[in-house]
Every structure is written in structure tokens, then in C-alpha cells.
Amino acid sequence: MNFLEKVATFDRLPERYKEMSIEAKKERIKEIKQQLGNRLFIPGHHYQRDEVIEFADATGDSLQLAQLSKTNRDAEYIVFCGVHFMAETADMLTTDNQHVILPDLKAGCSMADMADIAQTEHAWGELQKQFGDTILPLTYVNSTAAIKAFCGRNDGATVTSSNAKAMVQWAFTQKQRLLFLPDQHLGRNTAYDLGIKLDEMAVWDPIARELVCEGPIEQVKVILWKGHCSVHEKFTVGQIEELRKNSPNTTIIVHPECTFDVVQAADLNGSTHYIIETIKNARPGSSWAIGTEMNLVNRLAQQHPDKNIFSLNSTMCPCLTMNRIDLDHLLWSLEEIIEGRLHFPITVDEQTTLEGNLALQRMLDRPS
């Protein structure tokens, strides 16, 4: 058996979980949660399946859940129901005697994977040749631990979709330019809202290894990494135009990971937290088209039956990698803990943790 075959075998869900009824799985999860008590903490991201959220001890965005993991010192086992970079952040913020577990190692993030450390180090060297020591790196928290560490050791910081504006403003008090990783759309939308012109932005293409800009290169203030969210990029201006014709009284709210044209055409845009709070506070009977992940949209529709809530993209599918975590994988992880085994532990090395936490702390020290 070769290495790949061994990995595939190790990662293969045992057949017994496929044979169990949903009710039996849920009862077993409840038993284990009761058995482990405070030693177990299950954070669940907003985009997770309802069947997983049902057993989450806390729901929220990635950084919020990592911070909750940090403050929950009683939890020996943190079974993070999200994706890989979120579990990495939780491991960086928690203590050595806490174990962060990802129920399925294939639960990754295509956006985070669009900026690896080798590409980033190469880009940094080329940009330094072009612009000298005038650039500060910022990375969206939707990035790998290695990219967070890169920003940490180069005086940069992390950002969230909620505090991106404040962090970009801070970055410009430090340096003349900034490199925004790995989501070009959040970077572009944020910079534009702060008055930076589109021709003052350039895009670094890590595949072509080149900087693409519309205006004079010496006027570039924001360098955007050519990355995107595979879910949010599926919303289009055409969908908005069609909705305007068929349902003119519907308010359109989208996440700033959507493309610039979509954000400009929408009525409102903001972070997941902003979307949730806006819908919660909307008047009964109002109609809302939401441009974000389908699991969250469906959950909001269930939670607010007095409002008409639906996805801006009627053919949208849930985030495929986020959806890899299901009842089967959650139960598998929990039963492995009972058996004394750590199932898919996520560990970040000491140096990466140190530098990554510098980037996180610089963000946490800023007012949002």
C-alpha cells in the first residue's frame, strides 16, 4: 500500500456510520456530549449544515469561534465544525493542553488555498523590488496559518469582513501601500469605500507572477492578491437586474466577498454578522434577497418566518468544503475521543503560532 492509499484509508469514513439511522447518530452524539461535559467544546460556523449546528455549543464566524475556544479553558477537546484555516486559528489561540480537531480533513477553503506561502514570499520579493519598503501586508482571517505568520513577521495584521475598513485605515498610517491577501474582492470593495480609486489598485497574479494595474504603477496604493471565494463569486449583476424587474420591493444585501460590480449594484453589503443583524431587525413582511452561503440563507428564512427571505442566486449550492462536515464525521470524531484517540488533530508549529498571533493581536488591538 503506497502513501496516498494509506491516507485515503485513514480518511475513509467507517461503514458503520453509513448504516446508522439519523436518530441513532443524534442520540449517540448527545450521550458523548453529556459524558465529556465541559471537557468538550463544539464551535459551529454559520455556514455549517443544520444537523451540525444542532449540536454546536456556539455558532459564529471563524474568528469569533476561535476566540471563544481561547477563553474556554475547561475544554480539553475542541471539535471545530468549520474548515481547516479556522481550526488552525483556534489552535494558535488555545493552550498546548487543548486539542483542536477537524471532523474531516477535506474541509478546506478554496480562497485560503489561493495564497500559499511560497507564492507569497516570491510576490513579496518582487513587490519590494518594485516599490521598496513602502508596503504593509494585511491578510483576511480566511487564510492559512503560514500567511498569517508572514503578515506577523512583516509588521502586518489580519482583518475580518467586519473590521476591514478600520484595518485598512490603520495600514495606511503605517506604510504608503498595502498588500491585501487572499481575497481581492473584499480588498477592492473595502478600499473603494474608503475613497481609493480603482486605478489606484493593482492585482498580483500568483500564477502568472505579475502585477496587473490599470493606472500608472507609481500611483498604486493597494495591491490585491488574485484570490476569491468560490461561493460569493457566483452572484452576478444579471441576477440583481432580473430581481429588480420581478420583485422591485425586495432589498438586496450581499457579502463584501462578492465582486465589485455586485456589491455596487446591491442595496446593502456587509459581513455575515451584519447580514444576520440586518435581517433580525428588518420589519415584518419585508422581502430580502441575500448574497451569501446557502445554509445561512436557509437558516435565516427559518428563523424569521415573518419575512420573505431567499437567495439572490436561486441555483446556489451550499459551500461544498464546509458541507463535508456532517453528522457522520462529527460522531466519528467524538467516538474517537472516547476511545482515547485524537481524530484529525490540527496543530500549528510554535514559530508559526508566534508570528501568526502577532498579526492577530495587531488587529485585536485596533478599534473596529
Image (cartoon, rainbow, N blue to C red):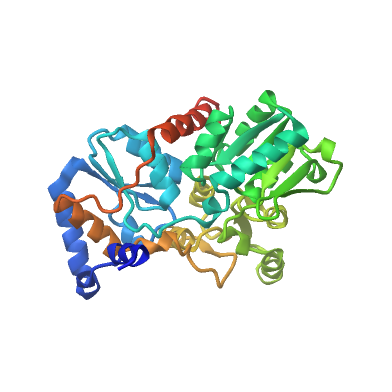
List the single residue furthest toward the front: 2
Residue at the location (59% across, 68% down)? 313
Residue 368, how many percent across, how many down? 55, 31
Residue 8, how many percent across, how many down? 33, 66
Q: Nearer the viewer, residue 42 or 309?
A: 42
Q: Work out whether 174 lies above or below 44.
A: above
Indicate left or right for 210 with 143 as reference. right
Instruction: State how many labels appear.
Output: 0
Q: Work out whether 165 lies above or below 237.
A: above
Q: Nearer the viewer, residue 25 or 112?
A: 112
Q: Nearer the viewer, residue 343 or 333?
A: 343
Residue 60 visible somewhere in the drawing: no
Write down the quadrant of residue 172 in the picture.
Answer: top right
Quadrant of image for the N terminus = bottom left
Residue 286, how many percent across, how many down? 56, 59
List the single residue furthest toward the right: 216
Residue 305, how many percent across, how many down? 44, 62
Write down the quadrant of residue 181 in the picture.
Answer: top right
Residue at the location (15% across, 49% down)? 340
Residue at the location (76% across, 45% down)? 202
Indicate left or right for 326 with 84 as reference. left
Residue 202 visible somewhere in the drawing: yes
